[in-house]
Image: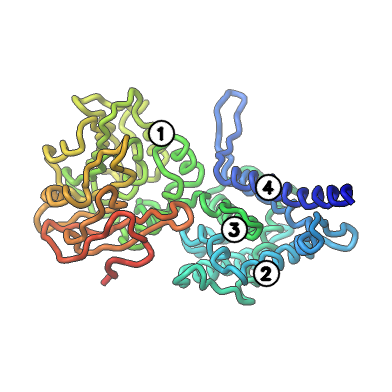
Amino acid sequence: MEKAKEAEEMLNRSAEELVTVLHGVHCDNSKLQYYAERPNGRRVSIMPLTPFVYEFFLFNSLYQVDWMASNEETRLVFHPENDCGDSKKQKSFISYIKSHAIKKPADLYRAFEPLLHIEKAEGEWTCVTPDSRISKSHGDKFFRDILQLQLLLEQCKKPSEFPTNKKTFRILKECTYFIYLVRNNIFHGSKTLGEVYERNQKRRIEVYDLFLKGLTSLFFLASGKDAAACDFVPCPIFSSSLPTKNSGEVLDQSLILSAIAKRVMKVGDSRLIAQFTKIIPPPEIDVSPSKKASLFYPSAGTDFLTPILLGLPYCTQFYFYERDHSKRPPQIANILRHIEGVRILTTPPLWKLNGDRQCLDFEFNGISRRLHWVHADNTAIFNEDVELKFYFHRGDSWGEGGSGQEWDSKLLPELIKLIPSNSSCIYLTDGIPGGFETQYSTETFDLNVPFIERGRAYYCGRLSPVTNAQPSAPAGRSASAPLATRP
């Protein structure tokens, strides 16, 4: 009796252990940046093809298992090889995750939410190159389905209300089959390495990768895991968020992962940028900021890239205050160099020491810009000759390591004096510490990244030098409801 019980526990554990092992691989695959090293030692990015291929290896392992039977029999049950092809196995896999999604639609929304933060799946870049396995009509159909999925995500007011009807799962099933055909092309050599890194092909593979990670993420959420790749996989940043002379992708997944690794960007910021620029769209490329147009970020640390990307359409001067003096400036220059429209003025890029600050000069869209990393108290900004056009603030605190300064409440009346008369200042803040006083804002919106920074509320809008009568937002306030609606 005891041996039978021990054997049963081993079978139960084998299914759980398989899920746990594959879940670890799945999460790592969404966080890692992949390189190939040439004989001369130079590294080249092999993104996004490599994570896509690895995710398909993982997906292949998952759909070999009959998960419904495994749960019923409380042991690991594989599909029979002789009378069950890949197509049938994949249908069974989708049926399994469908049964969970019907009970918990919010997980279905969560799994595919990254598709909401990329460009709409339409335009010339979506046209696939026909070959022996994939026709042009196959590709057109796939991207029409992805566009439909994006629209469903966009129209959904609450994740718990995401539709779990036949249309949704038809899209998932048919897109999965197309991804399978793409996988076969890569594995059977129908695509050369040169072809898969062509600009438009690379964009298409990024979409394939995000969709596939959505499928596998939904499985792991259905299996009771608290996190999945959908929560932190980076989404490419496009010219709709940062207008450049050439429309298209501004920052790819590889650069975003590099910025996160160098601690100049936070996980989830690519989605934060996409959400922010949907609420406050950037101006057209022909609108030039003045020489004094400035961004201010108190207690910034090395959190540089996201405020730079958001501030470039409005500012030429970027003031990052950090009292602690680091011997080594942030590793931002080589990331900036790869952004569409950016030109670094020196080779190698040099930070120049100037009194209490280090400065880095560059151009964006042909206009000179300067980063100021200032090692002084945040309040020293009041002594600068600036025209405040963007205020960015997050991650500060009362405790050790924080400034304890209430920039979003007590110091806000002084800060708005830096805004030119008859003008306004765009802001993005978490209101910590001290809460956010919205009476200085002409418009205020809640903004959050729900599945990444749970519990953190961001506020965005425009500050005015004239006081407006709006209620204040206390620190720690839920980000579920807007403070004000857009006109």
Give the residue type at disc 4. Thr
Cα–Cα gap, marks 1 and 2: 47 Å
- Quick one: label 2, few (<14), some, or many (20+) residues within 10 Å? few
Q: Nearer the viewer, residue 330 or 27?
A: 27
Give the residue type at disc 3. Gly
Q: Is residue 407 above or below residue 75?
A: above
Q: Which mark, by number, is residue 20? A: 4
From the viewer's perspective, is the residue at label 3 or at label 1 nearer? 3
Locate residue 476, reporting x and y percent. 33, 55
Q: Residue at x 51, y 61 (%)?
A: 113
Tag 2–tag 3 contact (CB < 8 Å): no
- Quick one: label 1, few (<14), some, or many (20+) residues within 10 Å? few
Cα–Cα gap, marks 2 and 4: 21 Å
Give the residue type at disc 2. Ser
Q: Which residue is mark 1?
A: 334
Q: Residue at x 49, y 52 (%)?
A: 235
Left or right of 100: which side holds 428? Answer: left
Asked which secondary structure carries label 1, the reply is: helix
Asked which secondary structure carries label 4, the reply is: helix
Q: Which residue is mark 2?
A: 99
Number of numbered discs: 4
Q: Which residue is mark 3?
A: 214
Q: Tell me where residue 218 sits by quadrant.
A: bottom right
Mark closer to the chain start, 2 or 3 = 2
Mark closer to the chain start, 2 or 4 = 4
